[in-house]
Image (cartoon, helix red, strand yellow):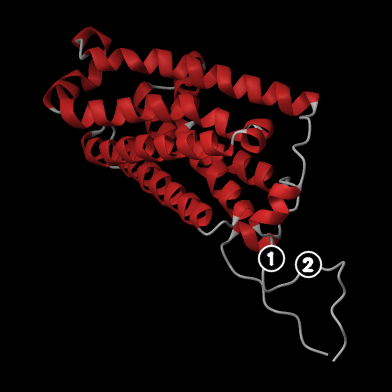
Amino acid sequence: MNAPDPRVPSAAAPYSTATAAARPAARPAPARRAGWWTVTALAFLTALFTARYLTLDPEAFLDQQRAVYLAHRGPLVLHVGGGVLAILLGPWQFLPRLRARRPALHRSVGRLYLLAVLAAGTGGLLMAPRGLVGPVAPIGFTGLAVLLLLSSALAWRAGRRRDILRHRAWAVRSFALIMAAATLRIWLPVMDLAGVPFDQAYATAAWTCWLINLVVAEHLIARLPGLPPTARTGRVPAAPPAG
């Protein structure tokens, strides 16, 4: 049997935490840094706009949904409170230097993010069936909540297994789905300016707000350094033939 080539990573322990941790944190490129600041600003503005729902002031609610929100304050607070916290915490988890220099902080913030996502997703599942423009919009928002919870759970599982690259891929998807709150609040005014009736704009927004984000997420995941194709799907690479 031929000796293994030391230059080729072993299939028995692919993409280990030690390998990923050994790499120095690269300085982000200007375009990547600008993208991070743009996303962070959108996340902050979305959180600021949405947090007013937590006052439970009827005047802050969407006119068409005021009665539903007032009748279901518990799920509303769960959904909005969790979403606001998750969207504020998410960007900081993608800073390479913070991950490299403060891994304990990264893990602590990640746990808090997961709890926030659990609240947001659970509240979303409870509120979605009562949404406007049924059944199109409620199904869209239900799909968003389910995928948010699923992608976050898979990110957590990969992190627990120290499968760092797969953890990052699922974390990108999770945050892309949380950022659907920002995309929704961009989509609706744009559709209004375009003269699209509210019901039609809202029904499409329930799907486009997260489908667009997932397309962008998959583009970013494909550009993650060192990410093998199998890390995108969760499959384990097959061992090379002996010989």
Helix, strand or loop at label 1? It is loop
Helix, strand or loop at label 2? It is loop
In this rendering, is residue 2 above or below 16? Answer: below
Tell me: 187 left or right of 84. Answer: right
Q: How crowded is mark 1: few (under 14 residues within 10 Å), some or many (20 or more)?
A: few
Q: Which amino acid does label 2 sit on?
A: Pro
- Residue at horizontal 43 percent and vertical 34 percent from the top: 204
- Residue at horizontal 67 percent and vertical 44 percent from the top: 219
Question: Is residue 195 visible in the rendered structure shown here?
Answer: no
Tell me: 56 left or right of 106. Answer: left
Tell me: 161 left or right of 48. Answer: right
Q: What residue type is labelled 1?
A: Pro
Tell me: 3 left or right of 86. Answer: right
Q: Which mark is residue 9?
A: 2
Q: Which mark is residue 14?
A: 1
Tell me the distance, in whole angstroms, between the alpha carbons under discs 2 and 1.
Answer: 7 Å
Tally the marks.
2
Where residue 236 sits in the image (x, y, percent)? Answer: 61, 70
Where residue 124 sits in the image (x, y, percent)? Answer: 29, 37
Q: Which mark is residue 172?
A: none
Which residue extends farthest left? 71
**N-terminal label among 2 and 1:** 2
Question: The C terminus appears in which quarter of the rendering?
Answer: bottom right
Which corner quadrant of the image does residue 61 belong to? top left
Question: The N terminus appears in which quarter of the rendering?
Answer: bottom right
Circles 2 and 1: CB atoms closer than 8 Å: yes
Question: Is residue 240 visible in the rendered structure shown here?
Answer: yes
Q: Residues within 10 Å of mark 2 (few under 14, many from 20)?
A: few
In this rendering, is residue 160 above or below 96? Answer: below
